[in-house]
Image: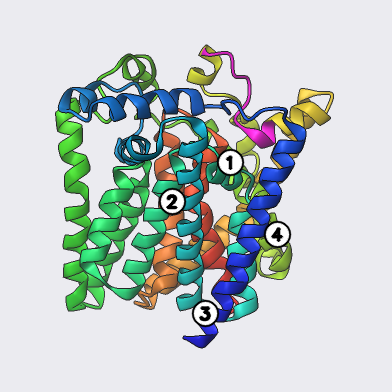
Amino acid sequence: MKRYRRSLVLFLTFVILFELLVILAGNYFRSEWGHWGDEWHFQNTIKKFGAEISLETLRHYEEMSTPLPFVVYALWGRIFGFDLFHLRILSLIVALITYIAFHRLLFITVRDETVIFFGAALLVAQPYMIGFSIFVYTDMMAILFLILSVIAHVRRRFILFAVALALALLSRQYIAFLALATGLFHIGEILTVKKHHSVKMLLACALSLVPCGLLFLFWGGPSPNSSLRARYLDQGFFFHPTILSLYICLLFVYLSPLAVIYFRRFYSSWRVWLLVLPVSAYYWFFPIGPSKPSVDVGIPTVGLFNRILLTVLPDARLVHGVFYLCFLLAIPILIWVAKDLVTRYRKDNFDTELFLSLAIIAFFVVMPFSYLGWEKYFMPVVPLVILRILMIAS
């Protein structure tokens, strides 16, 4: 316990100093902290729930994601106020709890204190995680419950797992990729290893789907019955190959420090490159571009990295060249994860590493069916990839 406290105090010191530096930098470069990105409509929805938390509000609020974060922010707003300053304080609190939970997850799986600090700091320093920490966004709450779900799974605490995964799904529907991975993991474990606790965990996974399933029945669809659903869901539930290209690219873009550290692990096999080079041609058939809903509202990019490339590079062909290079360098990481999954399954080795590898693959299977491809939607899988790769060290 003493070793854990020392590691946690060091990490929390880093987080607090880092967040203060971000806030100070923001104050320096911006004359005022007005609405940032989607904050304006998130704040409006929070105020709507703050005025009345009712079935009518729940059925028709103007968002596409599930309602738990809006309800939590609304309850906070009723106590402290609905202005951006007070709502952003809750964002910082949720972020701090999320980072503590991820540090704990690393501590119980990786053990090496240096590796733990690096992995946790890498999550904190992600550009979108910085935004989730200081602005009124609903993504951080989903990531928090996802991490708590993984902790519960590692500990085989089936009640905690059912509650945490249910709350994650009530924060963002696409956390369903973790439910898919959990179901496949424990079905495989029951059929091969025949462990008794697997039945409990499978039942917990099924129970976690109930609240969100009831919500879908109440809505008559996978999102609130609003004008947004009519506008966007004609693009949902179809496989979008360009969105798959996007998330494969982001595997390298946002996790390149790990790719560099474990360079030999991912890139040293010539056999892997014999597969990677022809597979990478996929990108040129389905190059990254904004989804139709983004184009309809005048957004020509898929997120922050895309905007940076368009700013610094004079030609769109160069932008696609950088994306292709990232795609090329991400494929060996994905191959390593898939190979790890198959190897462990063949050996009936149903451990945390297999679970994480299965969850990562499930993300890439589920997310291309979304109506919108956007860089920030990659963030829920980032802690899973960080943890899985860092477990190499242990």
Magenta-drawn segment: 297-306
Residue 196, image x and y in percent? 17, 77
Determine which residue is flagged by label 3: 5
> Looking at the rendering, which quadrant does residue 354 occupy?
bottom left
First-in-chain label (4 vs 3): 3
Looking at the image, residue 328 lies above or below residue 358: above
Residue 207, image x and y in percent? 16, 54
Q: Mark 1 to mark 4: distance in Å?
A: 20 Å
| Residue 276 in view in this figure | no
Residue at coordinates 68% horizontally, 37% vertically from top-left?
Answer: 305
Residue type at mark 2 is Ile
Determine which residue is flagged by label 2: 143
Main structural element of the magenta stretch: helix, strand or loop?
loop
Looking at the image, residue 301 lies above or below residue 15: above
Q: Nearer the viewer, residue 269 or 196?
A: 196
Residue at coordinates 53% horizontally, 43% vertically from top-left?
Answer: 132
Residue type at mark 1 is Gly
Residue 105, image x and y in percent? 45, 69
Q: Nearer the viewer, residue 354 or 214?
A: 214
Determine which residue is flagged by label 1: 131
Circle 4 residues within 10 Å: few <14, some 14–19, many ≥20: few
Determine which residue is flagged by label 4: 257
Instruction: Determine whether the residue tagged by mark 2 lies in a helix, strand or loop.
Output: helix
Circle 2 residues within 10 Å: few <14, some 14–19, many ≥20: many
Circle 1 residues within 10 Å: few <14, some 14–19, many ≥20: some
Q: Mark 1 to mark 3: distance in Å?
A: 27 Å
Query: Would you say 190 lies left or right of 279 here?
Result: left
